[in-house]
Amino acid sequence: MCGIVGYNGKNSVTDQLLDSLELLEYRGYDSAGLATLNGETGKVKLRKCAGRVTDLRKICHNDKKISTCGIGHTRWATHGGVSDLNAHPHRCGDVLLVHNGIVENYEELKDHFLLHKELKSQTDTEVVAAVLNRFYNGDPHEAIKRTVKYLKGTFALVVMFVDQPDVIYAIRNVSPIVAAYNDNGTMLASDVVALGATAKEYIVIPEYVITELHREEIKMFDLAGRQIHPEFIKIDWDTTQGGKGKYPFYMEKEIMEQPDALKATMEQRITDGKIDLSSDGIPDEVLCGCERICVVACGTAMHAGLVAKALVQSKLNMHMTVEYASEFMYEDPVIDEKTLVLAISQSGETIDTLEALKYARSKGAKSIAVINVKGSSIARESDYVMYTVAGPEIAVASTKAYTTQLIALFLLVGRMAKARGIFDDAAEKEYLENLIQAPGKMQEVLTRKHDIHKIAREMLDAKDAFMIGRGLDYSILLEGALKLKEISYIHTEAYASGELKHGTIALITENTPVVATVTQEKLKDKELSNIREVQSRGASVVLLVREDFDLADAEYADVFTLPAMSDEFMVFPASAALQLLAYYVSMDKGLDVDKPRNLAKVVTVE
Ligand code: F6R
């Protein structure tokens, strides 16, 4: 978590850092800070505070904007509470440091280097700054090398030494840092979105490589001192897409972008009316050679895996498990060279997913990653990658990343069915015809967003809510419930509706809000009778129902009809409706939709 940035160039560094930090705030937003170094006077300015980047902007307001070299940080607290003192950068002697990650042995290091008296904060980061300062005698490389030998855990460190005012140094283990040239200098950051609109390509800084950011060049050295030249990756999305455009929140913009993102993810993988994964370089042998599939992912990405599981089992008749990546290794998973592991992740940096993938590969499994951020750690660690074409997703609550992950997974399953001889040309054609309709069906829901807004207004005072459905509806609702709880703070539980009467129905009382989806032909009668059971106990039911289903004359608190598609594909219109519902509840409650409390977009700590 945490966003870090460094800039060395012609522009006023304070403005550049503040702008980049604002773009990185989705990674953490407890506190923010920056340090600048004036090359001519050698003067250091350190500004930091608990709060948002807007608060930092206020305290930097009167600063003279002459420095051209600096580092910045936006924090998601791990060690030490949210306070001005614990905010980064940390200064120890000649060292100014920002850090993303967790240094697990920081207590040991305090004892080993007898640092207790000189530390002011409770952070692991300040310990690293103090160790660096201990080792610093004018040679930054030597100090960095000696320090990282002692560090256990994950870290992206960006450092300035006060007597080296024209260079920023960086080194990392696991936690990402990317670097780029732009029109006015050089930059590094946790993520490509912060690199500025003029950067056309970027480098992912390799692990344990010392990077020097000069005003006009970026130099990298391995720990043996050899210069290395990593490959540049083209930025083929518009980083200015990072703005909110005409929308009040990124989340709404990202929800509305979905039809285009779905099309873009699909189009490059369809040739002459057939699914073609050749641009992903995934050979049919991999798709045919596996006997079982295992998804490792977290949160929303894991929910995409659950939808894929239903598809794999129904279309491929194959065994598939979907695991929380954070639990995967503790369950003694049965993984071997006949297992195909799918690692699904928007950021490509979720540490639990990364670790689970590494573990599966160590057991001989082949792997395909479904990733949004190019060149990210999980993408690099996997045998094959299918990139979703969602563009930058900034709102913490994932929307377009989820539905583009679904598109990639539908394409993958379709190609597997063809390669394994389960689909003939006609079956493939029918499957694709359905999939191609998904963006349009989502659009139909999005254009009726005001109807969902009206439904949302009825839920503003709810303390608890339930979402019920069976089969694929249940998987869809697990994601719908996560969306509602994370941004509206309404405690929401998705429940398999057939399970309710084994206990949970005790929680249904007069006016308990229950959102039910009924989208599956083969399940609708059972689902509707489960709905009647909760209604009989007083629940206020919001029904999201496929337009071609007959509801007889039953009454509901609210009904929203979903455009009809074949069962498996209903996840697309239903998800759009659930995303909008969560969005409007959060917005109307006056919450910060894009930055819900306690969360961060990229979870790089276990
Ligand atoms: C919820 C959400 C999270 C992420 C999860 C995994 O809206 O966004 O649950 O899905 O943290 O993140 P990635 O996909 O980056 O691995």
Image (cartoon, grey):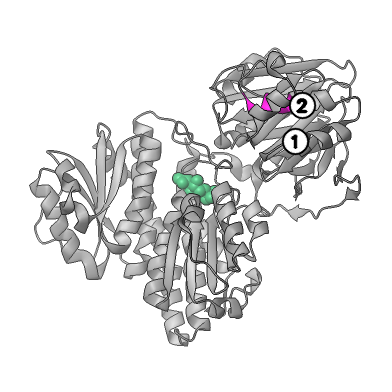
Q: Amino acid at mark 2?
A: Val
* Camera-side residue of 548 and 171: 171
| Residue 440 shown in magenta | no
Tell me if I can see residue 555 in this picture.
Answer: no
In the visual, does 305 lie left or right of 384? left
Asked if marks 2 and 1 touch (Cβ < 8 Å), the reply is yes
Relative horizontal placement of residue 284, taking residue 161 as reference (left or right): left
Q: Quadrant of residue 465?
A: top left
First along the sequence among labels 2 and 1 = 2
* Cα separation between marks 2 and 1: 9 Å
Q: Find numbered disc 2 in the image and state the secondary structure of the residue it sits on.
A: helix
Q: Position of residue 581 (x, y in %)?
A: 33, 44
Q: Label 1 belongs to which residue?
A: 150
Residue 586 placement (x, y as % from top left): 37, 35
Please state the extent of the stretch shown in magenta in the rendering. 123-129
Image position, residue 82 (x, y; %): 54, 22
Q: Which residue is mark 2?
A: 131
Report the front residue among 447 and 359.
359
Q: Secondary structure at mark 1?
A: helix
Which image quadrant: the C terminus?
A: top right
Q: Is residue 455 above or below residue 410?
A: above
